Image: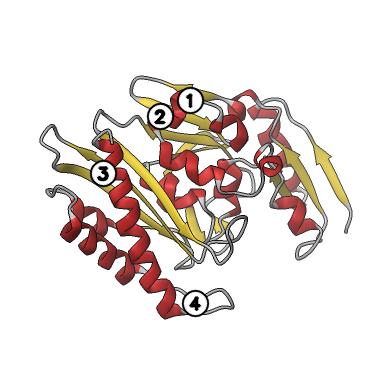
């Protein structure tokens, strides 16, 4: 391992000051939220010197607020903490299930969905679920805060829109109305603790007659970034989310995929599987919206 410095700011302003000073000096920084990706990378593929900026001691990054119209989840809130929040689990069961897929119980005591998003892996399990739930990134920087839709936050494999003097405070989610449901499913070669071959997240809202009036569908591990698939959502809207509608949404996900072949799956396999996962996740989201 190389030479490292460590900073532990306790306010947003202090964190931005640390980042700005390092950028001015031409020094690299890296944010530490949970550290479950960062520390592994430091010991293996990325040993270059840097200053680690620990944001776990900033109030805003540890905030979970559940309002009547909106939910805010701080970037450093561990998945284990989220999964113990029964109200949040009732509002976003799919999002919380995606967080529960990452690593072991011990890992979830540190790992955060904000960190998973900032790591920006194409196969990040929480990212399609975050996108499907309509997450908006709240980013802090020298000029204050700015907001970016989570589907626009990602720019490539391991890259995102954050500048050298910015960091993620957390994510805002519109609180779903009654008769809403979300779900996330992935396929992995092993039974647990593996990287997704493909993943799909679906969030939808039904009217009083059971017709879908709003839907968002996102896919992961089948393109350079997780993707919002508008055509898949459109295939569900105006239907009762029946088999035909789910098949059309699945076909839209397969069409949107642009995966690679690696040791975990071929291009053809991933394209087929992501469509299957969309159909199954859509059915789960529908049943949840119906109260089943």
> Which is more toward the observer, 288 or 82?
288
Label 1 SS: helix
Answer with mark 3 or mark 4, whichever residue precedes in sequence.
Answer: 4
x, y percentage for residue 114?
A: 56, 42
Q: Is residue 27 left or right of residue 109?
A: right
To which residue does mark 4 refer? 260
x, y percentage for residue 19?
A: 70, 41
Q: Is residue 291 left or right of residue 238?
A: right
Disc 2 residue crowd, few under 14, some 14–19, many 20+, Cα 10 Å: few
Give me the C-alpha separation between circle 1 and circle 2. Answer: 6 Å
To which residue does mark 1 refer? 86
The answer to whether marks 1 and 3 mark residues whose Cβ atoms lie closer than 8 Å is: no
Answer with mark 2 or mark 3, whichever residue precedes in sequence.
Answer: 2
Label 3 SS: helix
The answer to whether marks 1 and 2 mark residues whose Cβ atoms lie closer than 8 Å is: yes
Label 4 SS: loop
Residue at the spot x=13%, y=42% of the render? 211
Residue at the spot x=40%, y=20% of the render? 67
Disc 4 residue crowd, few under 14, some 14–19, many 20+, Cα 10 Å: some
Give me the C-alpha separation between circle 2 and circle 3. Answer: 15 Å
To which residue does mark 2 refer? 90
x, y percentage for residue 113?
A: 56, 42
Disc 3 residue crowd, few under 14, some 14–19, many 20+, Cα 10 Å: many
Answer with mark 4 or mark 1, whichever residue precedes in sequence.
Answer: 1
x, y percentage for residue 276?
A: 34, 64
To which residue does mark 3 refer? 286
Give me the C-alpha separation between circle 1 and circle 3. Answer: 21 Å
């Amino acid at each position: 391992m190389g030479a490292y410095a460590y900073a532990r700011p306790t306010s947003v302003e202090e964190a931005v000051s640390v980042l700005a000073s390092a950028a001015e000096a031409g020094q690299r920084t890296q944010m530490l939220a949970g550290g479950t990706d960062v520390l592994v990378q430091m010991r293996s593929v990325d040993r270059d010197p840097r200053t680690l900026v620990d944001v776990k001691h900033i109030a805003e990054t540890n905030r979970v607020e559940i309002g009547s119209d909106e939910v805010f989840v701080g970037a450093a809130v561990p998945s284990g903490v989220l999964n113990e929040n029964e109200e949040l689990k009732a509002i976003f069961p799919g999002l919380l299930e995606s967080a529960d897929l990452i690593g072991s119980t011990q890992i979830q005591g540190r790992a955060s969905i904000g960190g998973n998003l900032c790591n920006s892996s194409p196969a990040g399990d929480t990212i399609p679920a975050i996108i499907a739930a309509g997450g908006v990134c709240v980013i802090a920087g020298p000029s204050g805060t700015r907001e970016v839709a989570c589907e626009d936050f990602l720019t490539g494999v391991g890259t995102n829109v954050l500048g050298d003097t910015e960091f993620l405070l957390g994510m805002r989610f519109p609180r779903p109305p009654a008769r809403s449901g979300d779900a996330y499913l992935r396929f992995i070669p092993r039974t647990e603790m593996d990287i997704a071959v493909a993943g799909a997240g679906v969030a939808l809202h039904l009217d009083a007659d059971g017709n879908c009036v709003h839907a968002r569908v996102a896919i992961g591990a089948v393109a350079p970034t997780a993707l919002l698939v508008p055509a898949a959502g459109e295939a569900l809207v105006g239907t009762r989310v029946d088999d035909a509608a789910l098949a059309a949404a699945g076909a839209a996900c397969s069409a949107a995929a642009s995966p690679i072949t690696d040791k975990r799956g071929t291009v053809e396999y991933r394209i087929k599987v992501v469509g299957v996962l969309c159909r199954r996740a859509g059915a789960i989201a529908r049943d949840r919206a119906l109260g089943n």
